[in-house]
Image (tube, rainbow, N blue to C red):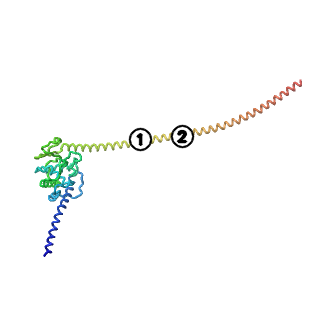
Amino acid sequence: MRLPLLAGWLLMILPIEAALADPVEQAEEAVRKAEVLEQVVAPDVEVNEPVESISEQEAQLVDPEGSDLLEEPLTCLARSIYWEAKGVPGRDMESVANVVMNRLAGEAFPNTICDVVKQGSEQPPCQFSWWCDGRPDEVVEDDAYEVAKEVARLALNQELPDHTDGALYFHDRTVQPHWANEFLLTADSAQRTDAQLAEWQARFDELGDLQQNMNAALTEELAERDGQLQAQIEQELAALNEHTQSQEAELISQLESVNERLDALHEELDDLGSGQQEQQETVSGLQNRLTAMEAELIELRQTQLALSAGLEALQ
């Protein structure tokens, strides 16, 4: 009789353990879905996983104590909704979610919800004051946080209507920030107003188009100038090459002329050397002949003297 009773207790224990493990798995699944849904909204982000909606039960199991680190989209969005509008029922929470999601979809803002919420913490002022006001960020009102998580779930599932008409900013009605007059008022609630950066966005788009046009024109002009410069370089290189070849030919001609003149000079020197030798031989011959004639002259004078002496003797 005890064995069946023990088996019954085991059957009761197993479902309880499974139920205890199930919330953790559901919370992890909700986080995974939220990260994919976040990528669907963010611009220029490729989604490689199936897109699935977050269920109400899954959303409530995420950050159950309201004290988790702000590291995933559902908690970051729910905590922002909670701290910005926890004391105001109705559309205020939804409007805060609208502004965060509108920023996520804008190219001028970060492409994750947590980065959108934390923007400005590196270089104040913060975009959302609760994030860097120096006070604890843990939830203190569980009921309000449950509502905030439900609003965050609807926003991520893209099931929440945009009550702000695309607003990117909001402020409490009791304050008047310096930027409020620069933007178009798109919505007004009991506690806060939502402002759309309509004029700024239009200017931003216009500047973006202008930059694209300028980049295209600059690229075209650079390409044209590059072609012109390349043609000019090729033309100058061709002219320089032609001039170099001409100078080289002229130099070769001058060298050949100098070589010819040197050869002629060598021939003249050779001829001059040969003529000098002949002249020296001629002079030597003449000197010999002159010596012989002088000797003959002496001999003739002696003969004359002898004849003269003989004539005198005959007389």
Q: Amino acid at mark 2?
A: Leu
Give the numbered dot on residue 168: none
Q: Specify whether 147 is left or right of 298.
A: left
Observer-nearest residue: 132 or 114?
A: 132
| Residue 216 image offset from top left, x and y in percent | 29, 44
Residue with the mark numbered 1: 236
| Residue 269 image offset from top left, x and y in percent | 62, 37
Observer-nearest residue: 5 or 187?
A: 5
* SS of the residue under disc 2: helix
Mark 1 and mark 2 residues within 8 Å of each other at the beta carbon:
no
Q: Residue furthest bottom?
A: 1
Q: Amino acid at mark 1?
A: Glu
Q: Specify whether 19 is left or right of 227.
A: left
Is residue 207 in view from this perspective?
A: yes
Alpha-carbon neighbours of circle 1 within 10 Å: few (<14), some, or many (≥20)?
Answer: few
Observer-nearest residue: 80 or 209?
A: 80
Q: Residue at x 51, y 40 (%)?
A: 251
- N-terminal label among 1 and 2: 1
Q: Residue at x 24, y 43 (%)?
A: 207
Residue with the mark numbered 2: 255
Q: Residue furthest right?
A: 314
Is residue 159 in view from this perspective?
A: no
Image quadrant containing the C terminus: top right
* SS of the residue under disc 1: helix
| Residue 48 image offset from top left, x and y in percent | 24, 57
Q: Gap in Å between the C-alphas at discs 1 and 2?
A: 28 Å
| Residue 162 image offset from top left, x and y in percent | 14, 50
Alpha-carbon neighbours of circle 2 within 10 Å: few (<14), some, or many (≥20)?
Answer: few
In this picture, is 126 found above or below 287?
below
